[in-house]
Image (cartoon, grey):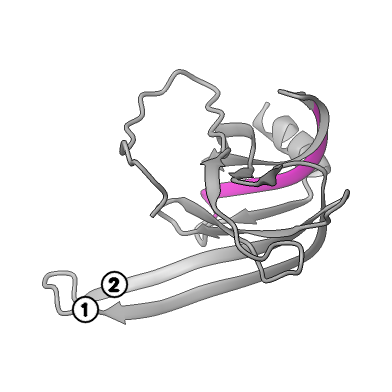
Amino acid sequence: IRDRLLLTVRSRATEWLSSPDGRIEIYCNINVSNYISGMDIRFYYKIFFDGYLLIQDSPIGLNFIDMLPLDKEFRLYHVERRSISDTIMTINEPYARIINQYNEITLFLQEKTPPFRLINIVFRISNEGVAFRYVIPEQSEIDEFEISAENTIFNFPYNYTAWILPLESFT
């Protein structure tokens, strides 16, 4: 079943990346789907660990004050990849030497409809986990902005227990 599932995912996937040891995989795609507001073209990611689905198709997006949300009608126009393997020296014993090893992919997205804003999604995968961030590059369409909500969804396939920090703001 796993091989069949991964074949289906890979055939739909726009891009994918794995951890240095290959145990963690992330698949990213842009799909048309019936989401909250109807049929939209959204960016989705999913994460596997040792072949088991941990996070199923989950959309991303940002809401702003005084600006339309940046969460749909994307096109992928560029991809950059890199792998890092180095050592970080600290003064903290017993962890004075930390091995810093990860694979990274940057997905450059642009809205397909006006105002054609840009957003980059950077995924970094180590043997211990996955992290990602949004990067909003300089552009004439966005001068200054204030984020009012992050619409990143973590769509777990099962009923897991999770703990979050109840933060009052993004800063």
Q: Amino acid at mark 1?
A: Thr
Start and end of the magenta stretch?
22-33
Label annotation for residue 98:
2
Residue 123: where, in percent of width, then height? 57, 57
Residue 31 part of the magenta segment: yes
Reading the chain from its start, which is encountered first: label 2 or label 1? Answer: 1
Q: Amino acid at mark 2?
A: Ile
**Of 57 and 64, which appears nearest the observer?**
64
Residue 5: where, in percent of width, then height? 71, 31
- Main secondary structure of the magenta stretch: strand
Residue 168: where, in percent of width, then height? 34, 41
Q: Residue at x 70, y 42 (%)?
A: 71
Label annotation for residue 90:
1
Image marks 2 and 1: residues in contact by CB distance under 8 Å:
yes
**Of 158 and 62, which appears nearest the observer?**
62
Q: Residues within 10 Å of mark 1 (few under 14, many from 20)?
A: few
Cα gap from disc 2 to disc 1, whole angstroms: 8 Å
Location of residue 52 by image quarter: top right
